[in-house]
Amino acid sequence: MFPPAGHDHDACAVDTLARAEATCRAQGLTLSPGRRRVLEALARSHAPVGAYDLIEQLAAEGPRPAPITVYRALSFLTENGLAHRIERLNAFVACAGHHDAARPLVFLICDRCGQVGEVAADEVGIDLERTCAPAGFRPRSAALEILGVCRHCANTPEPSHAD
């Protein structure tokens, strides 16, 4: 779900990239340098990043990528379960889970810090197959986005807003 307070984010990002490389090898896919660069940028944070923010981050580190290049990389990463699109925010996060890419997900989005946790829907008691069966509908993919406050933010006082 959410990383524990004080976790080693560098190790987390390294783990994300290692999982992505292993997934690509197992599925006969290529994690090209451009795709890897986009995934590395996503893996630096647990907060969603928009495509144009990604372009700015990547431009600060080297040559500015063309928007189409970043969008193609994001498409590859999301289609293969290496990253997820958070529809509500029109932004992307690196996949933090060890789950089957086809399993429906629940994204927990913190209103205060912006971090996103992910959990497989069936792990929280949501059975889409059974829910959709009476309608004769077979879900191909699904994601549920829930807004709230993560445990870290819930344990810190909300900032006061002076008028």
Image: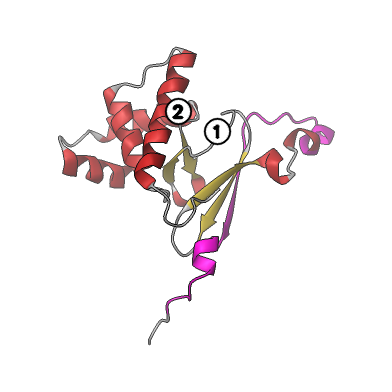
Q: Quick check: 158 above or below 99?
A: below
| Amino acid type at mark 2 | Arg
Asked whether, in this view, residue 125 is left or right of residue 157, the answer is right
Image quadrant for the C terminus? Answer: bottom left
Numbered range of the magenta stretch? 131-159
Q: Residue at x 48, y 72 (%)?
A: 156
If you read the primary sequence from the N terminus, does the residue marked by circle 1 or circle 2 appear first? 2
Q: x and y percent of residue 90 in the render? A: 44, 47
Q: Which residue is mark 2?
A: 19
Q: Helix, strand, or loop for circle 2?
A: helix
Q: Residues within 10 Å of mark 2 (few under 14, many from 20)?
A: some
User: Quick one: which residue is furthest to the bottom in this view?
Assistant: 163
Q: Residues within 10 Å of mark 1 (few under 14, many from 20)?
A: few
Q: x and y percent of residue 113 in the render? A: 44, 61
Q: Quadrant of residue 118?
A: top right
Q: Residue at x 46, y 54 (%)?
A: 115
Q: Quadrant of residue 150?
A: bottom right
User: Quick one: which residue is furthest to the right in this view?
Assistant: 134
Asked whether, in this view, residue 24 is left or right of residue 68, the answer is right
Q: Quick check: 31 above or below 120?
A: above
Q: x and y percent of residue 141 in the render? A: 62, 32
Q: Residue at x 73, y 43 (%)?
A: 126
Q: In the image, is residue 146 part of the stretch drawn in magenta?
A: yes
| Residue closest to the eye, 80 or 135 | 80
Q: Say which mark, if any, is on residue 98.
A: 1
Distance between mark 1 and mark 2 Cα atoms: 8 Å
Q: Residue at x 47, y 22 (%)?
A: 23
- Residue 129 visible, this angle: yes
Q: Say which mark, if any, is on residue 87.
A: none
